[in-house]
Image (tube, rainbow, N blue to C red):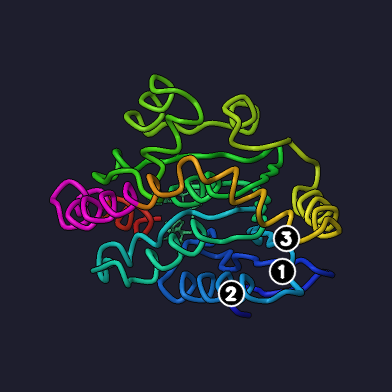
Amino acid sequence: MADILIDRVGSTLHLTLNRPAKKNALTPDMYTVLANSLNDAAGDFSIRAVVISGAGGAFTGGNDIGDFLNTPPSGADSPVFQFLYAIHAFPKPLLAAVSGNAVGIGTTMLMHCDLAYAGADAIFSMPFVTLGLIPEAGSSLLFPKLVGHVRASEIFLTGRNFGAQEALELRLINQIADDPVATALEMARIIGEQPPTAVINTKALLKSGHHEAVTRVMEVEGELFRIALESDEARMAFMNFLSKRAQG
Ligand code: COA
């Protein structure tokens, strides 16, 4: 089975992160498929919205930690940054359906989604600092903008998890749903019946106040993130994670 499943449901493109044995941890190849799918969907008039979900009871464990250690992204043309720019620039409605863990980029990508639904079992986390890293995907701007400085600081600086109810209170998701994929697909269908140019222009207007600022902050984060990946703090944290798993 492919690590990204690509399905059409009416006018919706449904992308499923499908590496369940590794909690759908994201590899460079997966980022490339996601970025290409989004870029193709942007230019395909028949696609009106995209839904992203995860297979096997998890959204994603975040970036593959082995890849962080062995093949860290080296520049703005790296697959992870191509994916981040693709979600940031995606002109059509982007919806997320979260079940289980949404770690790192699994939570920060939600800040680029227009609608998000989560199961009651969802666990969100952005353990960048805990891993010796810094926030990415524009989240150092988007998260405090969404939740306020003190709550963003507490979550980023402690690296703590939070559940679906808190995600709802933080306005990271629209709703806790029994079946988040079905709910996201239904919302995508409803939006897909709206006049498409009005939808695209409305999304652009909703993002216009901070779009350029997010582009700039993503560039700064990208530089700092690449430096942090090479640091002793980060490499120790990655090796700890991998050795704990190797010991079972
Ligand atoms: N990179 C590489 N492998 C990962 C991974 C990641 N980000 N997330 C999970 N996996 C792997 C585990 O190593 C394990 O592999 P194994 O069975 O070969 O040992 C498998 O996925 C299942 O994970 P496990 O930890 O046993 O599941 P869990 O339900 O106990 O915990 C998580 C799930 C997501 C909380 C936990 O795996 C985790 O903390 N992952 C790392 C998250 C992270 O720090 N990501 C980077 C963010 S920037």
Secondary-structure class at tag 3: helix
Residue at the outermost top position: 150
Secondary-structure class at tag 2: helix
- Residue 146, position in %: x, y? 51, 30
Q: Upstream in the sequence, badge 1 or badge 2? A: 1
The amino acid at mark 3 is Thr
Mark 1–mark 2 CB contact (< 8 Å): yes
The amino acid at mark 2 is Ser
Residue that badge 3 annotates: 197
Mark 3–mark 1 CB contact (< 8 Å): no
Residue 37: say if magenta: no
Mark 2–mark 3 CB contact (< 8 Å): no
- Residue 113, position in %: x, y? 59, 49
Q: Upstream in the sequence, badge 3 or badge 1? A: 1
Q: Is mark 3 within 8 Å of ligand 1?
A: no
What residue do we see at 43% from left, 62% from top? 85
Q: Residues within 10 Å of mark 3 (few under 14, many from 20)?
A: few
Residue that badge 2 annotates: 37
Secondary-structure class at tag 1: strand
Choose top left, top right, bottom left or bottom right for residue 117. top right
Q: Which portion, as a residue range, is magenta?
A: 216-237
Q: Upstream in the sequence, badge 2 or badge 3? A: 2
Closer to us: 240 or 119? 119
Residue that badge 1 annotates: 13
The amino acid at mark 1 is Leu
Closer to us: 224 or 88? 88
Question: Which image quarter holds the N terminus?
Answer: bottom right
What residue do we see at 64% from left, 30% from top? 168
Indicate the quadrant of ligand 1 in the picture: bottom left
